[in-house]
Image (cartoon, rainbow, N blue to C red):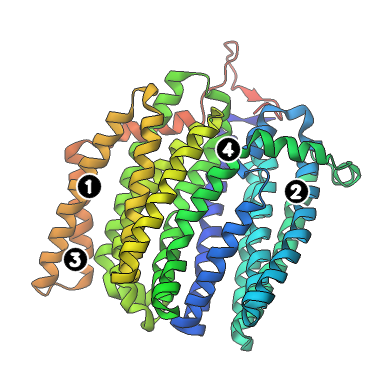
Amino acid sequence: MRSLGKLSQSAFVFSAAEVVNRLINLIAMMIASRHYGVAEFGRLGVALALTAILTIMTRFIAPASLTRELCLRPDERVPVLANYLWQRLAVMLVSTGLLAVAIAVSQPERLGLYVCCYLYLYGIETVITSRGGIIAQERFREASISSVAHSLLIFAAAYVPVRVGWPLEMMVAALATVQVLALGIVLGLSSLHGYPLKGMLRQPVNWGDMWLDLKRNRALWLAGLFIAGYARLNVVFCQFLQGDYEAGLFTAGQRLFLGLGLVASVYQQTTYPRMVRDVADRKQTGDYMELSGRLLVVTGQFLALLTTLGGVGLMAAIWGREFGASSQAARILVWALTFNFVSLASYNILVAEHRFRTLMWVTLAGLVVNIGANAGLVSAFGAVGAASATVLTEAFVLAGMLLALARYGRTLTLASVVVRSSVVSAAAVALGSGLTRLGAPPTVVLLLGTAAFLAGVRATRIIRRRDLVDVYRRLMPEPKAAPSASPVDLPRGSH
């Protein structure tokens, strides 16, 4: 029996564990950048970008879609998850072979790097998606254990090869190998809560279901592919038009962007099961959209402000002294966080509503805008141009998603929040720039700029204390039950 209070505590623990997981992934990239240098880091960034797109191409069931199916079909959760795992194994073997042949023909000197990067990313996605079986039952404590174990394995796989002096390809191979161990931990914990391991191993593979899922979710599959395209092609343009060094500078900013994006990602994973169950309630969904949007807008602007005020010193401290030149691109790129965060909350609603075709057309338009912006900006401005193209694309995609969700009546409210918070952020940045010109120490600039931003948020009432309380209540709504004098206990599996 699990009380509401225990469930709330477990959700908080899982959120903290996911933050640690994403930070460890960022630290693994920091270790690589400091040891291998800018050009090699650029080579790694391009390999990860291209293999990430291939990972999406071989994704027949999106993570959000699998969690959705497990939430809505609890009686069939074992065959659904087992079928997913067997299909992932088969697709991995075939796609890895095809990738190896393609790279051996086109770039044989990079064969090992590309194959290892693909297996690394494929393994991470399989681990995270498989964890959806635990999350669908809101077993956040067990999900936290698997997340922390996963992060420790990734850290070891990045740290040991660097200490030993292995080449870049060997480090990525170690990162790929530990994904197998992480998946074993997830499956072991899943077997304790409704997913018996023996039952899943004996479950026959239903290939017809795979093609049916692909047919049914092909629009969502294409949307994921388009998102991967406009999120990853920037660094490819940098390498193609400017070389490995410029690609390395942009990769540093992009990895920081992805690391800071963990806030919205954790929020998505924690709230998504509730979102699926409550999507039929238009008022509830509208409240989720507005309150989540307010919280994520302010968080994104705050993180972008810290990065902007941190400047060269921040990038050099994170990635190494060679990467100080990447600060200009990073300062631009982080302002896409606000658009990216709210887009993610909007994406949740559209997926929960099964509006896959809408997502497909919005993200396709975003991909077209991104390719055009990169072609025009990267050749002239390098990494800075790629960062500018990212901000433009994320803003465009967010506008499309908000228009798609206009029927909830909160689009204009969220647009107003974005505008007001941007004005507050611009004022804080202007203050920080003025203090820097006057010779103020970086710590003073950071503290005063942050204080100005928080004061502006409070003065403009972008977010209030009661908004945070409301978000918490949306995450953990009170269960409907007959009045009782004693605390209400929720039966296992009722979530």
Look at 52% across and 53% down and name the residue there: 228
Badge 1 marks a residue whose secondary structure is helix
Q: CA distance from mark 3 to mark 2?
A: 47 Å
Query: Farthest residue in the bottom direction?
Result: 165
Q: Which numbered disc, 1 or 2, marks the residue that appears first in the sequence?
A: 2
Q: Amino acid at mark 2?
A: Leu
Residue 204, by quadrant, is top right
Q: Amino acid at mark 3?
A: Val
Disc marking residue 445: 3
Q: Amino acid at mark 1?
A: Ser
Frontmost of labels 1 and 4 is 4
Q: CA distance from mark 4 to mark 2?
A: 32 Å
The residue pinned by badge 1 equals 422
Badge 4 marks a residue whose secondary structure is helix
Residue 8, by quadrant, is top right
Q: Position of residue 257 (x, y in %)?
A: 41, 60
Badge 2 marks a residue whose secondary structure is helix
Q: Which numbered disc, 1 or 4, marks the residue that appears first in the sequence?
A: 4
Q: Which numbered disc, 3 or 2, marks the residue that appears first in the sequence?
A: 2
Asked whether the viewer can see residue 303, the reply is no
Callout 1: few (<14), some (14-19), or many (20+) C-alpha neighbours within 10 Å? some
Q: Position of residue 407 (x, y in %)?
A: 39, 22
Q: CA distance from mark 1 to mark 2?
A: 43 Å
Q: Position of residue 458 (x, y in %)?
A: 21, 41
Q: Which numbered disc, 1 or 3, marks the residue that appears first in the sequence?
A: 1
Which quadrant of the figure contains the C terminus? top right
The residue pinned by badge 2 equals 189
The residue pinned by badge 4 equals 219
